Every structure is written in structure tokens, then in C-alpha cells.
Image (tube, helix red, strand yellow):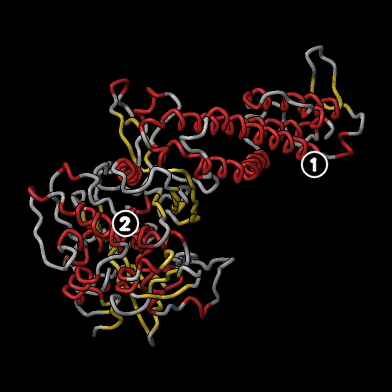
Amino acid sequence: MQEFNLIDESWIRAMTKDCKIKEVSIKEILLNSHEFAGLAGETKTQDFAIFRFLLAIMFTVISRYDIDGNSVVLEDENKDFMMNQWREIWDMGHIPSKPIENYLKQWHDRFWLFDDEYPFYQSTVVKAKKGTYATSAKLIGTMFESNNKQRLFADRIEDGKVLSYPEAARWLLHLNSFDDIASKSPVTPKRPWVGHLSLIAVKGKSFFETILLNLPAGLDSERGVFHEKPSWENDNNIDEFNRLIPVPDNEAALLSLQSRRIMLNREADNVNGYYISGGDYFEDTELFDREYMTLWLAYKEKGGGKNAVLKFKPKVYTSAKKVWRDFGSVVGLKIDEEDSSTSKRPGIINWLENLRYDGIIDRSYMLNIVTAAVIYDYGQATSLPVKDTISDSLNFHVQLLGDSQKEYCRQILMEIEKCEKAAYWVGILYKSLQVASGRADKDAKTELSGEADSKLQFYDDIDRPFRLWLASISSEEDINEACISIEKKLRNIAFNFGNSISRQADKQVIFSHREIPVFSPDSKKQNAAEYISKALNLYFAKIAKIFDKAGDLNGETDKGRSGI
């Protein structure tokens, strides 16, 4: 029985330009993309899962149809066809209806959420072959509630864990992208490919722009023609779990990779659970030619010695790290020019640079880079439960991507490095205050939990000023003057932060004359106030040295010392 076709039914959450949330169908979100601001799902990771699915449709359509909806067959002699299609659509300002309608009409039967033969993003064999059963509570990406125990602080009560068809469809795509490896029947699945990624994309001024800016139709045209074929065109009712496949040779296949064999279970027009097991996977993690939506990390294989080959793998995100601190990974640079060979730009950033170089987007275009990732609990290696989901954004001018602007980028990286050094001394100051209060060992090597928290708080304090500064930088501005400006702000924030945490020390300890087991070079014991005073003065001196471009202190250290 066929029910709930995703081409026609409303299920994708999108935001209109007047900031209203609306559920729309596949056809509506694509053909009216210029009227929407963007996706607005329950989480940013869900938005990425749905966005990759929509991009797979777009790659397929522009490779098979011209603007008027006429079928074409790509050959090596017309390998620039997709890029020419892209340019025409960009100039139109909206996605043409004929090619979309023709494709969706042809494959309409593959988009039924419930179907006896080809259910969307599902496989009928997983239920028959005794795949692991889970309730819909685990399908919900804000919970990932296991079958063994309930979430202590769940965002839904029991009735809210039974899903409507639209919500189930959204979380179905999310599960396929970010599932854990807890299911064991009939096999333990591999982690989904998208779950490996530190996802990165660029957001345009409308959802139409967002689609086109993340559709690198001409990024690798020199490789020749690869025919786009998304996974839903295949027969996924395969009696094989954890199927090893070659690395997909086209973007549509990679973006729609079926990492799981899933079958939704429904009751009374709702989804109350699902059957699941391992789907398709590949071993090669070096998708330089295909995976363009991730940050990369350089590494050398163990045991290779000096001759070990440099390789790249998707970078693992931490929930505490701001994306601007990874600016080097975003633009593919390091401070040392010779060391930049160990950096790799995300494919989407190369694509944007090509658009700027060709004059398709203006050199003053402000990029809004968005990132997202799922954080797995690697301490539970047998199940890899999802511990957290994170997202962030970053704005900077596209002109910074040009070769002529590498020096600007390196200056930015230097300022980020100075922030890292300042955070280090924040941690040292915090530990000194703990030592003075008798709560920590002066020679302890491990980082205190409060020490880590103090660093995070410092990064929170400098977060907005640094983001605004980065967004303001252009090639028309003297980069040295720009660095002087931000260093003055950062130094002031660091001084004030040192004052703040010193005031939080135990007043009874600070103003007492009790001696503590801390010794000065002349072997005389110090009291707490004396020790804190020296620690704070050392902190101010280090901060002033780090932000050396800020110039004279203008009495700021004296102001800082007043904190004790």
C-alpha cells in the first residue's frame, strides 16, 4: 500500500523570508526556493541531512535535463554542460520548473514513505531478516533514546515520542546520516559516512542562493563525465547488510548514500518504531574528489616512519570549540607557508573561490559559513552513542580566499594563535588562584575542571568581538592596522577577565596572613595574598607580551592589579 509521497506532501520545515516556519513538499521547496530564507528543522544536523538529500536531486536534474526540461546525455565532449546549466539557473534567480517536474514525475514511485516494494530511504528486507527493533524515541535526533533506558532529561513526554509522517520522514534522513552502532542484529553496523564529517556549507541570501552556492557543478570538470545516480534509483531491497561498496564516483550517490537498512513501523497513522541494520559503506576516507562538505585533518599512518605518506581524514569536532578557531582549516592555510602543505581546503571553499575568480559572485560578497556535527561518545566503542550535536557559523568576505590575500589570512591565523596563548595563561592564573586557596597542588600536571571552564569562559568573552572583526576585514583595509585594533580589544578583555577571576578567590584566604605551602626562590614562605599578587602580575605581563601590537598599556596593568 502506497502512502505519503514526499514529492507532494508537506514535510520539510522551512523558514519564509518573513521568519515564519512552514512545512513544504520537495517540489515546493525547490521550485519556490527563492521565496524561502532556508531550512528550519528541529536541529542543524537534521537540516544538513535534508539539504544533502535535496542537493542529490539537484545534481541529478541538472545532469540530465536542460533548462527547458529536455533530456540530455552527458559525454566527455560536453562535460561543461552542468556548469553551463548552473550559470543559467544562477542568472535566472530561481530554479526552472520543467526539469524538476519531469524528473520527479519519472521517479514519483520512489518517494512514497510507505510502499510495499520501494519505501523511501528504506529496505523491506531488514524487517524480514530480523533487524534490531527500536522505538521512535531513538529515531528522534534530539533524544537518541536507547532501548535499554530512558533519557533522564528528555525534551518530550511519552505522547510526543510517537511521530507523525512528516516528522518521521525528517528524522529518517537524520538517522541514515548520524546513527550510532548500537544495533547488533543481524550485524553490527558501520558508522554512517556523514557521521564522520565536520560538516560545512555556505548560506546564501535566500534558499535558492544556498542551493546554488553548495552545488559545485563545475568544480572537477577536468575529471571527465560521471553520471549522477542517487541511491533511491537503485533497488535497496538487498539481502546483504554492511555491504562494502566502491567509493561513489558521483556527487548524487555520495550525498544520498544509504548507510542503513531501515524499515519504519507505523500504527494508527503514526510511526512508533523502526527496524534497522547496517547498510552500504566504503573504506576509503580520502574523498578529495567527491566529499566537499567537510573540514579535513592531516595525518600520517602509524609505522610509516619518516617516509610515511601524508593523508587526510574528516576532522573531528569538539562541542567546545568555536568555528573561528578553525579558520585555518576553513581556508586551507597555516601560519607557516611551507607548513600549509599539511592543510586541505574543503571542496566547497574551492568552489566559492572559483565563483569569485570567475566574477560570478562579487569579490565583496559576504560568506556565511555554517558548520554542524554529531559528537559521539568514543568511550563506549561498542555502541558509539551520540553525546551531543553542535553547530556554528562564521562570516567573512569571499575575497579573503584569493591567492593574493594569503598574507591577510595568515595575519588572522596569528591573531587566533595569540588567543590560544592568552587562554593558556588564563588557565595558569586560575590554577594559581586554586593553589593559593589550598584547593590544588602547585605541581599537578592534569588540567583542573575549573581551569578548562575558565578557558571556555574567556573564549566566550572574546567570541563576539573576534567574529565582528573577522567579518570587517577586506583587502581595502590595512591588515596591520586591523590587527592593532583587535589586539587592543582582546588585551582589554583578557585584563578584565584576569581581574574577574581573581576577585572570585576566597576573600578570607586572600586577606588573611596565613602561610601556605608555596615557596619563593629565597625559600621564604608566602601568604596567599602575596602569591596571588605575583601570579596576577605575571598574567598581565604575559598578556601584554602576547598582544604586543596593542601598544602602550596606558595604566591597564595598574587597573588590573586593583583586583586584589
The residue at the far bottom in this view is 268
Q: Is residue 170 left or right of residue 531?
A: left
339 or 263: nearer the viewer:
339
Q: CA distance from mark 1 to mark 2?
A: 51 Å
Residue identifier under label 1: 504
Q: Residue at x 32, y 22 (%)?
A: 305
Number of residue marks: 2
Q: Toward which corner of the image does residue 186 lie, by quadrant?
A: bottom left
Q: Toward which corner of the image does residue 553 lie, by quadrant?
A: top right
Residue 209 in the image: above or below residue 440:
below
Q: Position of residue 196 (x, y in %)?
A: 37, 49
Could you tell me the amino acid type at mark 2? Leu
Mark 1 or 2: the one toward you? 2
Q: Are marks 1 and 2 in contact (CB under 8 Å)?
A: no
4 or 57: nearer the viewer:
57
45 or 209: nearer the viewer:
209
SS at mark 1 in the image: loop
The answer, for residue 427, to whether it is visible in the render is: no
Q: Position of residue 100 (x, y in %)?
A: 23, 69
Give the mark, 1 or 2, whose residue is nearer the N terminus.
2
Residue identifier under label 2: 212
Could you tell me the amino acid type at mark 1? Gln
The answer, for residue 373, to whether it is visible in the render is: yes
Residue 175 in the image: above or below residue 10:
above
Residue 62 in the image: above or below residue 407:
below
Q: Position of residue 183 (x, y in %)?
A: 36, 62
Label 2, residues with CA under 10 Å away: few <14, some 14-19, many ≥20: many
307 or 24: nearer the viewer:
24
Q: Is residue 214 left or right of residue 330?
A: left
